[in-house]
Structure formats: C-alpha cells, structure tokens
Amino acid sequence: MNAAPLPPARARFPRTARVRSRGEYGRVFEQGRRHQHPLLSLHVLPDDRPARLGLAVSRKVDTRAVARNRIKRVLRDRFRRLREQLPQGAYVLVARPAAARAGSAELTQAFEQLLLRAGALPCPAPAGTMPAPEAPSAPAPPSPSIQPPRCAGRAPLSE
C-alpha cells in the first residue's frame, strides 16, 4: 500500500500556523474583534506572531463528524493558501449551522469576505474597466456622485 506523497513544505499546515491552547482561544474571543457572516464568525486578534488559524465547529453545526471535518478541511486549506498575505495575529473561525449546508465555494467565499471586512486582505481589483471614449471633445468634470469603491468599510486590522 503506497502512502500519498507529502505536499511541499509551504503547502503544509504546521503547528506554528494554528491556535492551539484554550488560553489563546480565550484571549482571541475576549480581546479580538468579531466579524460576522451567515455561515461563519471570524474573531481576529493582532499580535507579533505569524498568522495562525483556530477553528470551532461544534455539533450544533452538524451532528455528523464527516460534515464538521469537511468544513474544517475547506477553511484550513483556504487559510493555508492565504497565510502569507495575512497580517500577523490569531484568526479564529466559528462555524454556524448554515455552514453545514454550504458548499466548499460558499465557505471559501464567506471566509474571504470576513477577511476583507476585517481589513486582513487587500481590496480586490475591479472586475473590468470601461473602454476609452472615441474622441473626447472636452474633458468632463469629475462627477461628485461617483465614489471610490469601499472594500471592507472598516479600519485596517493593525491598530
């Protein structure tokens, strides 16, 4: 029986990338900022250590361990891919019952939206641009009704 090959070192999820102790979870819940989504709740506590992830997926979310483990696996994988871009600190995700019915793409999207709201990820680039006008006769004054897009609508993570 052949074992699956190990992923490259950067693709693993080392202990240093995890919130592990009860005390650390308690500090994040008490002192961190909370951001909510119908599927997940994100608690963020900035500190001087590399980005770490903690997951809380209780039996209230789903009684089946397979479903709870799927949620954790999807969220861990997305965090692992984003970890280098995230500011230092502890990130604890708490799954809500609706997460059990959500697909992997929905969970990933919810996680990314929460990170944007928390100011932990930069705003995404606009989807596209309008084509340049053919031949402008006179430069139009800037419209006061057009505002730059607000990505997170909140202060950045570092305070």
Image: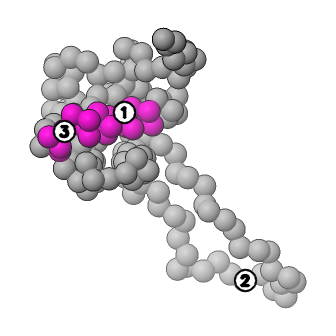
Badge 1 crowding class, 10 Å Cα cut-off, few under 14, some 14 to 19, many 20 or more, is some
> Residue visible at 85% across and 88% down?
137
Badge 1 element? helix
Question: Quarter of the image holding residue 51?
Answer: top left
Q: Mark 1 or mark 2: which comes first in sequence?
A: 1
Picture layout, residue 109 above or below residue 86: below
* Residue under numbered circle 2: 140
Q: Is residue 33 left or right of residue 74?
A: left
Callout 3–callout 2 Cβ contact below 8 Å: no
Q: Position of residue 116 (x, y in %)?
A: 43, 48
Which residue type carries mark 2?
Ala
Badge 3 element? loop
Q: Mark 3 or mark 2: which comes first in sequence?
A: 3
* Residue under numbered circle 3: 64
Nearer the camera: disc 1 or disc 2 = 1
What label does residue 73 carry, if any?
Answer: 1
Instruction: Please give the range of residues in magenta.
Output: 61-79
Which residue type carries mark 3?
Arg
